Image (cartoon, rainbow, N blue to C red):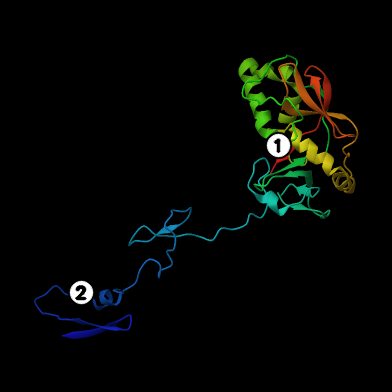
Amino acid sequence: MRVFRSAGKKVYFTLLASSFMFPISAFAQCVETDCNTLGYDSTTACDNGIKCPFGEYWACPEPKEPEGAVLGQCTGYAKNCKIADILYTDGTCSADVISGKTPVGVVVYIGGDGCGQALALEGLGEYPWSTEQVDIPDLPNYSSEPINDFSSCENTKTVIDYSYKQYGDSAYKYYPAFWQVYNYAPSSMPETKGKWCLPAGGVLNSIYQNKTAIDQSLTRINKPNIGNSYWWSSSENTNYYAWYWGASSGEFGNRNKLYGDYVRPVLAF
């Protein structure tokens, strides 16, 4: 009879010469424990996790705060920012001008889900909303001021997809305002081409509510301020009309889609 200690306990084994013999080290690995003791504390599988070999438990890495936003999509990083902050090409934002970093926009909207939108540092000119009068399928119609429409990029994608399906490479001729923002590629970050959007009514309303602070940030980085133009929104009213926004008064109105109004994109982050 041989006695071994394992995890503070005496374990007795009878070793017979005629029996199959285990190496002594094998006995040392026999411990009484469980998945939780080994650090497996989740019953849900996780990215880069390790499954406990004794059951359906996982050791999951601690979630890390992103160091910056992924420009062009929502990652929730915007909750770390404030409206009128400067958004930089590395995905970070700050109220201050930071030497060595390049601005790409100014934050104009932050949702409760931590998703934000930043205004381009320049306008693109005046363009018709469309050159035809069609009620776009899948694009919501707003009968009153669209101040609760924050779906700038969803609206833009809907119109881009519809127009391309109808007209292919000629689609830009039929929906100029949308294609101008879709093809926008600022020199500070040309890889964002295809990610800019025509702002929805609620985002334009947020710009008006915070106009003074936004203009101050634009001035600090020597970019054009909001001004007093009439801007197109991506919010639709009917087949004939879409909503425009007056930058000086903050008021909305219905405009024939054939009319040319000011276009300035926003970028999701």
Q: Position of residue 84 (x, y in %)?
A: 81, 48
Which residue is at the far front? 144
Residue linked to disc 1: 150
Query: Is 209 drawn above or below residue 158 in the view shown?
Result: below
For label 2, the SS is loop
1 or 2: mark nearer the eye? 1
Residue visible at 69% across and 24% down in the picture:
141
Instruction: Residue lying at the far left in this picture: please name it.
Output: 18
**Residue at the spot 44% in from the left edge and 59% down from the top edge:** 42
Residue 260, compared with residue 55, is above or below; it is: above
Q: Does the rendering let one see residue 183?
A: no
Residue 22 spot, x, y in % from top left? 20, 74
Do callouts 1 and 2 mark residues in contact (Cβ within 8 Å)?
no
Disc nearer the start of the sequence (1/2) = 2
What amino acid is labelled 2 in the image? Phe
Q: Nearer the viewer, residue 247 or 95?
A: 247
Screen quadrant of the C terminus: top right
Q: Name which residue type carries label 1.
A: Phe
State the residue position of label 2. Answer: 22
